[in-house]
Image (cartoon, grey):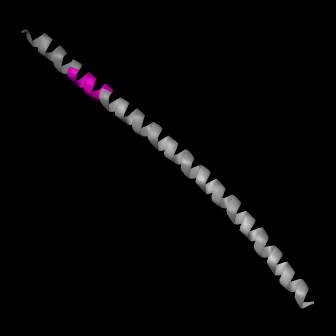
């Protein structure tokens, strides 16, 4: 086997490793994007719940204040 064929084989192996690495990174990136979307959704839900709780507390405070008058 000539040295140029050996070099070509080594280059092909490196390219295949790079492709495999890129695929792994792409898959991880997709997974992380999905997790981020879920976290954003959960955070948005919690903010909505906090707003509802604040409204209820404000209503209770108003009710207590009106009873004291």
Give whichever of 2, 50 is nearer the camera.
Answer: 50
Residue at the extreme bottom: 68
In the drawing, does residue 60 fall left or right of residue 42? right
Q: Quadrant of residue 53?
A: bottom right
Tell me, yes or no, whether the highlighted magenta stretch contains residue 67: no
Quarter-of-image position of residue 62: bottom right
Residue plotted at (86% across, 80% down): 63
Above or below 10: residue 57: below
- The residue most toward the right is 69
Seen from the viewer's position, the closer of residues 65 and 19 is 65
Tell me which secondary structure the magenta stretch mostly adopts. Answer: helix
In the rendered image, residue 47, in percent from the top left (x then y), is placed at 67, 60
Location of the N terminus by quadrant is top left
Residue 14 lies in the magenta stretch: yes
Q: What's the magenta region?
A: 13-19
Residue at the (50%, 46%) spot, across then down: 35
* Residue at the image point whose x is 61% and y is 56% from the top: 43
Position of 20 with respect to 65 (left or right) is: left
| 4 and 25: which is toward the camera | 25
Q: Position of residue 8 (x, y in %)?
A: 18, 14
Q: Is residue 41 left or right of residue 54?
A: left
Q: Residue at x 50, y 41 (%)?
A: 33
Horizontal and vertical percent for residue 9? Answer: 17, 16
Q: Position of residue 44 (x, y in %)?
A: 65, 54
Q: Compared to 7, does 68 lie above or below?
A: below
């Amino acid at each position: 086997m000539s040295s140029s064929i050996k070099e070509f084989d080594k280059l092909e192996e490196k390219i295949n490793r790079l492709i495999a690495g890129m695929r792994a990174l792409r898959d991880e990136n997709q997974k992380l994007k999905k997790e981020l979307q879920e976290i954003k959704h959960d955070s948005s839900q919690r903010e909505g719940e906090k707003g509802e709780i604040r409204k209820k507390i404000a209503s209770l405070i108003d009710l207590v204040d009106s009873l004291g008058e």
